[in-house]
Amino acid sequence: MAKDRSVLRANALEKVRLEHQAEIDRRNNEAERDRSDQEKALQASRQQRAVNILADGLGRLATGDISTDINEPFGAELDRLGNGCRRPLAT
């Protein structure tokens, strides 16, 4: 009978430990999801800013205004677009 109680107690403690670990894992996953969502929102904002700047510059170029400079950096992954548009305007 004492052995049965000991097994029950050990099982109860293990259950509490597993529930605690599950809660920690859930919180960590939620925090990671929040960080990922924030990074995606920041990336979307940067991309929209680059699109707006390029659209404005190309719109001016289309009307014959070659005095427009695009000097703002767009960020690592979008700088290639900015550099490609800067060259024609610089000539």
Image (tube, grey):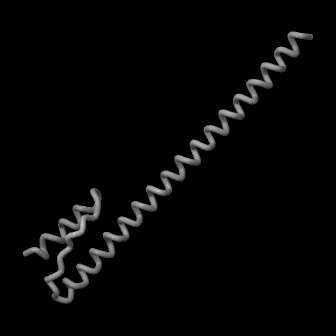
| Residue at x 87%, y 14% (from the top left corner) | 4
In the image, residue 20 above or below residue 43: above
For residue 18, side relative to residue 61 (left or right) = right
| Residue at x 20%, y 70% (from the top left corner) | 71
Q: Residue furthest bottom?
A: 63
Question: Which residue is nearer to you in this view: 84 or 26?
Answer: 26
Q: Quadrant of the C terminus?
A: bottom left
Image coordinates for residue 80, horizontal then vertical, percent: 22, 62
Q: Quadrant of the N terminus?
A: top right
Image coordinates for residue 37, horizontal then vertical, percent: 50, 56
The number of discs equals 0
For residue 36, side relative to residue 58 (left or right) = right
Quarter of the view holding residue 7: top right
Quarter of the view holding residue 65: bottom left
| Residue at x 79%, y 22% (from the top left corner) | 11
Q: Residue furthest right?
A: 1
Image coordinates for residue 17, horizontal then vertical, percent: 71, 28
| Residue at x 69%, y 34% (from the top left corner) | 20
For residue 19, side relative to residue 57 (left or right) = right
In the image, residue 24 above or below residue 52: above
Q: Residue furthest left?
A: 91
In the image, residue 39 above or below residue 74: above
Image coordinates for residue 79, horizontal then vertical, percent: 24, 62
Quarter of the view holding residue 44: bottom left
